[in-house]
């Protein structure tokens, strides 16, 4: 293994680590506010970096094995239409407003839980 490959793997490891910490923080905040994520089907954790229009999508649950939605999208226009429409609906709500049936929950200023 070359040094460059090792550095790339280490960078990827830490990026995933911090993404997972962000998701744990969102879960903790959501549960602390007494909001529950009750949905049958996939649930997508979407974290936005609005400074660079970067949308990180992680599917949570057993239904995610076949999910086509995952990874990083570098523009809201690149976000899959189903997710984009639900994020836009949730974006007009204040964070920690109770979940919207069939749509999801906005857990923070740049964090969403979207129902698939």
Image (cartoon, grey):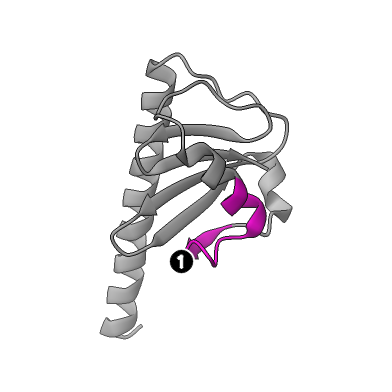
Rendered view: 40 above or below 71:
above
Rendering quarter of residue 109: top left
Q: Is residue 40 left or right of residue 106?
A: right
Query: Is 113 in front, or is 89?
Result: 89
Location of residue 58 in the rendering, given as x and y in whole percent from the top left corner: 52, 50
Q: Is residue 71 left or right of residue 96?
A: right
SS class of the residue under badge 1?
loop
Which residues are drawn in magenta? Answer: 70-85
Q: Is residue 19 magenta?
A: no
Q: In the image as oriented, which residue stretches furthest toward the top?
A: 34
Rendering quarter of residue 8: bottom left
Instruction: Judge the density around disc 1: few (<14), some (14-19), many (≥20) Cα neighbours within 10 Å.
Output: few
Rendered view: 34 above or below 46:
above
Q: To which residue does mark 1 refer?
A: 75
Q: Is residue 8 left or right of residue 47?
A: left
Location of residue 28 in the rendering, given as x and y in whole percent from the top left corner: 38, 26
Rendering quarter of residue 24: top left
Quadrant where the C terminus is found in the figure: top right
Residue at image position (49%, 61%) is 76
Query: Is 49 in front, or is 7?
Result: 49
Residue at image position (54%, 20%) is 36
Residue at image position (73%, 54%) is 66
Q: Is residue 48 left or right of residue 66?
A: left
Q: Is residue 78 magenta?
A: yes
Residue at image position (35%, 42%) is 22
Quadrant where the N terminus is found in the figure: bottom left
Location of residue 77 in the rendering, given as x and y in whole percent from the top left corner: 53, 65
How many marks do you count on the picture?
A: 1
Location of residue 113 in the rendering, given as x and y in whole percent from the top left corner: 52, 37
């Amino acid at each position: 293994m070359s040094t460059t490959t090792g550095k790339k793997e280490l960078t990827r490891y830490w990026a995933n680590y911090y993404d997972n910490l962000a998701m744990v923080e969102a879960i903790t905040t959501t549960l602390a506010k007494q909001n529950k994520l009750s949905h049958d089907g996939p649930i997508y954790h979407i974290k936005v970096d609005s400074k660079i229009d970067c949308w990180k999508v992680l599917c949570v649950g057993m239904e995610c094995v076949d999910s086509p939605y995952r990874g990083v999208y570098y523009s809201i226009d690149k976000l899959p239409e189903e997710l984009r429409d639900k994020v836009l609906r949730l974006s007009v709500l204040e964070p920690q407003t109770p979940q919207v049936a069939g749509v999801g929950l906005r857990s923070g200023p740049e964090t969403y839980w979207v129902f698939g």
